[in-house]
Image (cartoon, rainbow, N blue to C red):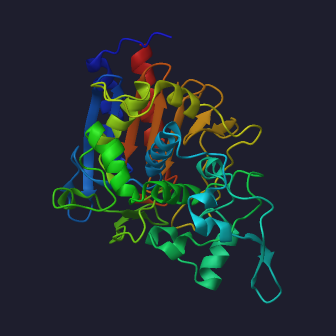
């Protein structure tokens, strides 16, 4: 399909309406759209911090949470290309600690976890597809019980102990969103002998010019960080002192800081079949074609229940529509009401960051806020309006 011609002034007019209106419901936002060649739209509105009234700017730095996952997926795909990572091999070959993982079969009468050996080994494929069996405490009640009753650290502590959780089921039998891709990052480290951040910097970030993206803040990014806000029960927004810690482990599932401009460069790589807009190859075109397919088989992406209300509401994109999973994105199996065509790839981050990549039409976008809990009505509603306005403008 030939990508549509996009008139930038028409697009800007349509998107300004959404972005300029966003501070009615969120502290501040940075939103952008790109095609294969360049950023078509990038704008900020509102505040980085509603308490200090510091203005949001387009170079504001965000904790991007699970929008980190796709970059870890690229690092794994690169190693697969090189023949040093077999997605179907037991992942314990690369990370011996995965050989010790057990399945949680509930809790006994005294409240202690009941554990057993899994029926098969975890594979890297399962880690990347969220079928290995790892979960999150804010989306799974059993994991939340491990945290509240047994002291299991939150994954956002970026500690090694936070990774040491049991499986919720035998590998490959269900889809459960969780810390699987944090473990995939450990696979990358086991093969390369380097920290994940270093691998990303050498293989992805520097080639794409993503100079503001890293697992730790630098002197050039620290002063641009947007403050995290908490949505209170009455709908108000309170600035918090939340910050990701200096990581003991580079968490491939959630740990990066970045800017919208940087992430648009990453989206462009997918629109350009694995190359930067300037032609530097990150992935081979055949790898891209392989990666964006549905690899779940008959399994489907499920609704994410908000088990910890301060961190997440119940969350599901396009309820009632089937969704699959690729390496490492959600796929909408049917055309979405925003105008996003079937087969597009997308995902989100816990602090209400959202993106989509439409390879058919050659466009993608990213919407960044810093709000807990996830699936905040003001932010996700603004994002969906932003995406729909993009398609309305493109299709004229």
Residue 146 at what x, y percent from top left?
A: 65, 77
Q: Nearer the viewer, residue 270 or 78?
A: 78
Position of residue 332 relative to residue 90, above or below, is above
167 lies left or right of 228 = right
Residue 83 at what x, y percent from top left?
A: 53, 40
Residue at point 59%, 69% (across, down): 97
Position of residue 322 relative to residue 311, above or below, is above
Residue 288 at what x, y percent from top left?
A: 50, 30
Residue 334 at what x, y percent from top left?
A: 65, 27
Position of residue 2 relative to residue 179, above or below, is above
Residue that protrudes farthest toward the front in the picture? 83
Residue that protrudes farthest toward the bottom in the picture? 110
Position of residue 319 relative to residue 174, above or below, is above
Residue 393 found in image quarter: top left
Q: Nearer the viewer, residue 232 or 32?
A: 32
Q: Nearer the viewer, residue 271 or 305?
A: 271
Whether residue 105 is visible here, answered yes or no, is yes
170 lies left or right of 367 = right
Whether residue 137 is visible here, answered yes or no, is no
Quadrant (top left, top right, bottom left, bottom right) of the C terminus? top left
Q: How many marks?
A: 0
């Amino acid at each position: 399909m030939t990508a549509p011609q996009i008139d930038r002034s028409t697009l800007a007019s349509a998107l300004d309406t959404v972005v300029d209106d966003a501070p009615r419901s969120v502290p501040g936002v940075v939103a952008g759209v790109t095609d294969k060649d360049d950023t078509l739209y990038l704008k900020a509105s509102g505040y980085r911090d509603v308490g200090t009234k510091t203005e949001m700017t387009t170079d504001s730095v965000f904790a991007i949470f699970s929008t980190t996952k796709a970059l870890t997926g690229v690092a794994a795909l690169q190693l697969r290309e090189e023949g040093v990572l077999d997605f179907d091999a037991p992942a314990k070959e690369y990370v011996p600690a995965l050989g010790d993982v057990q399945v949680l079969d509930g809790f006994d009468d005294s409240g202690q976890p009941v554990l057993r050996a899994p029926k098969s080994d975890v594979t890297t494929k399962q880690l990347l597809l969220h079928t290995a069996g790892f979960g999150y405490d804010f989306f799974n009640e059993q994991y939340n019980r491990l945290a509240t009753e047994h002291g299991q650290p939150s994954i956002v502590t970026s500690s090694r102990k936070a990774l040491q959780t049991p499986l919720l089921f035998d590998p490959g039998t269900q889809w459960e969103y969780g810390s699987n891709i944090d473990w995939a990052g450990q696979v990358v480290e086991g093969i390369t002998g380097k920290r994940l951040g270093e691998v990303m910097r050498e293989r992805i970030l520097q080639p794409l010019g993503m100079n503001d993206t890293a697992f730790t803040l630098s002197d050039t990014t620290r002063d641009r960080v947007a403050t995290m806000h908490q949505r209170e029960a009455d709908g108000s927004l309170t600035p918090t002192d939340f910050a990701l810690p200096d990581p003991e482990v580079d968490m491939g599932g959630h740990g990066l800081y970045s800017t919208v401009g940087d992430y648009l460069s990453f989206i462009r790589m997918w629109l350009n079949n694995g190359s930067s807009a300037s032609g530097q190859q990150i992935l081979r075109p055949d790898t891209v074609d392989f990666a964006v397919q549905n690899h779940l088989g008959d399994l489907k992406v499920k609704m994410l229940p908000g088990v910890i209300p301060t961190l997440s509401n119940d969350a599901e994109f396009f309820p009632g529509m089937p969704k699959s999973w690729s390496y490492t994105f959600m796929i909408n199996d049917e055309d979405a009401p925003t105008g996003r065509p079937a087969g597009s790839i997308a995902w989100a981050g816990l602090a209400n960051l959202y993106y989509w990549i439409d390879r058919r039409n050659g466009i993608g976008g990213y919407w960044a806020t810093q709000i807990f809990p996830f699936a905040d009505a003001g932010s996700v509603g603004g994002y969906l309006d932003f995406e729909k306005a993009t398609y309305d403008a493109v299709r004229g």
